[in-house]
Amino acid sequence: MDLNDNLVTEAFIYQGKIGCFTSGRKYDTGLTNTGKIQFFTGTGFEPAIFFNDTAPVRGGVNVASNQIR
């Protein structure tokens, strides 16, 4: 499945949804953000959050309650 980005650094489950941290390509936001959290919608992945920081490496994500850290 294509996530339309250059690098997938970590996958996780959040509130029953599959999520991935990705980075590399700019999304059409007009901003310079290249880091993204994308969620699987049932047919593909859609960006939900954009950030300028480095995406976490494998094993670097902790999901607790309603937080992704």
Image (cartoon, rainbow, N blue to C red):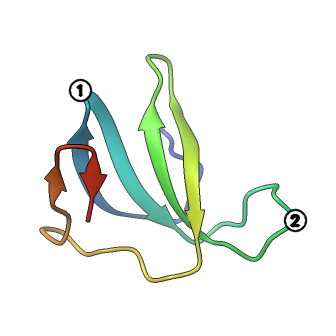
Q: How many marks?
A: 2
Mark 1 crowd level (few <14, some 14–19, many ≥20, 10 Å Cα): few
Residue at image position (81%, 58%) is 29
Quick one: which residue is furthest to the top in this view?
42
Q: Which residue is mark 2?
A: 30
Figure check: 54 above or below 42: below
Q: Position of residue 33 (x, y in %)?
A: 67, 72
* Picture disc at residue 16: 1
Figure check: 5 above or below 1: below
> Could you say which is closer to the camera, residue 49 or residue 11?
49
Q: Position of residue 12 (x, y in %)?
A: 22, 47
Compare marks 1 and 2 and give the one earlier in the sequence: 1
Amino acid type at image mark 1: Gly
- What is the C-alpha distance between the residues marked 1 and 2? 30 Å
In the rendered image, which quarter contains the C terminus? bottom left
In the rendered image, which quarter contains the N terminus? top left
Residue at image position (59%, 49%) is 4
> Could you say which is closer to the camera, residue 64 or residue 10?
64
Figure check: 50 above or below 42: below
41 with respect to 24 (left or right): left
Q: Is residue 17 visible?
A: yes
Amino acid type at image mark 2: Gly
Which quadrant of the structure image shows residue 18?
top left
Q: Is residue 1 visible?
A: no
Mark 2 crowd level (few <14, some 14–19, many ≥20, 10 Å Cα): few
The residue tagged with tag 2: helix, strand or loop? Answer: loop
Q: Position of residue 16 (x, y in %)?
A: 23, 26
Figure check: 24 above or below 27: below
Q: Position of residue 19 (x, y in %)?
A: 34, 43
Quick one: which residue is furthest to the right in this view?
30
4 with respect to 22 (left or right): right
